[in-house]
Amino acid sequence: MGSTRLPGKVLRRLGGRTVLERVVRAASCGGVLDDLVVATTAEPADDAVVAECERLGVPWHRGPVDDVLTRFLGVLDRLECEAVMRLTADCPLLDPEIIAMAAGTWRATPTLDYLSTSPQPRTLPRGLDVEIISAEALRSLDAAATGHHRTHVTSYVYTHAERFRIAGLMFPPGDADLRLTLDTAEDWELIKTVVDHFGDGPVPLRTLVGWLRERPEVVALNAGVRQKSLEQA
């Protein structure tokens, strides 16, 4: 709830659902998760996030505001799992098909430490990303990651790629110029326009991209927003 550029964004309502509910639904519709946990903060403002989790029947875990890695490790301590999929709650247009594809690739490649749908150069629009990290690699970060790497959970892995077994999924021809994440009022206007058009259900990647390419005036709504650097966020 403490977003600096768009406070309370995860509980804003889109098409009758909160942003968080849309993310939870996309994660569930992928059909690949054994457990789903919302990792929020211990701040009083996030009591509202816990209340929403209770309404949705989704388990939750609370931890430090900026040390998100510690939150993830707290969840890992509660679960018996070999890997963790990370989905951020400011991405209400997540595509369950991409979630399922990432999980299928992970399971077909058992030697991996980390899988991402946003390798460099990235090809997905920002806001549809999926990451998977092995439980072993995630635990190893506790001793290695400091500063902003603890905020971003997995950034130590892909900025020290020589230490890990990493794979990336690419989605040609490439639509990285499109911004579908929710961080500003401009992002909200674009995402609301998408939901107003397509309705309640998740929209497949190619359907969504094709629609946006035919409507440059919609893409322009948040074209001027700049993504924060790792060090800034």
Image (cartoon, grey):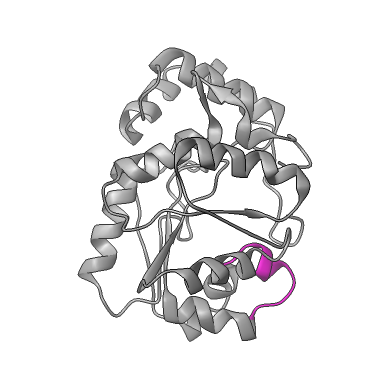
Residue 154 appears in view? no
In magenta stretch: residue 175: no
| Residue 163, placed above or below residue 192 | below
In the image as oriented, which residue stretches furthest toward the top? 197
Q: Is residue 85 above or below residue 7?
A: below
The one nearer the camera, 143 or 205, is 143
Q: Is residue 183 visible?
A: yes
User: Residue 114, image x and y in percent?
Assistant: 41, 71
Q: Main secondary structure of the magenta part?
A: loop
Instruction: Tell me if residue 147 is in the magenta stretch.
Output: yes
Answer with left or right where residue 132 lies relative to residue 219.
left
Quadrant where the N terminus is found in the figure = top right
Residue shown at the point (28%, 43%) measured from the top left: 97
Q: Residue at x 48, y 60 (%)?
A: 120
Question: How far across and down, in percent of the image, does residue 212 sit?
Answer: 44, 23
Q: Number of marks in the image? A: 0
Name the residue rendered at 75%, 72% in the picture.
Answer: 147
Could you tell me residue 187's position as x and y percent? 63, 29
- Residue 73: which quarter of the image? bottom right
Q: Which residues are magenta?
A: 145-154
Q: Is residue 122 above or below residue 115?
A: above
Image quadrant holding the C terminus, namely bottom right
Residue at the left extreme, as displayed: 108
State left or right for residue 53 relative to residue 167. Answer: right
Quadrant position of residue 152: bottom right
Of the pair 4 and 10, the residue shown nearer to us: 10
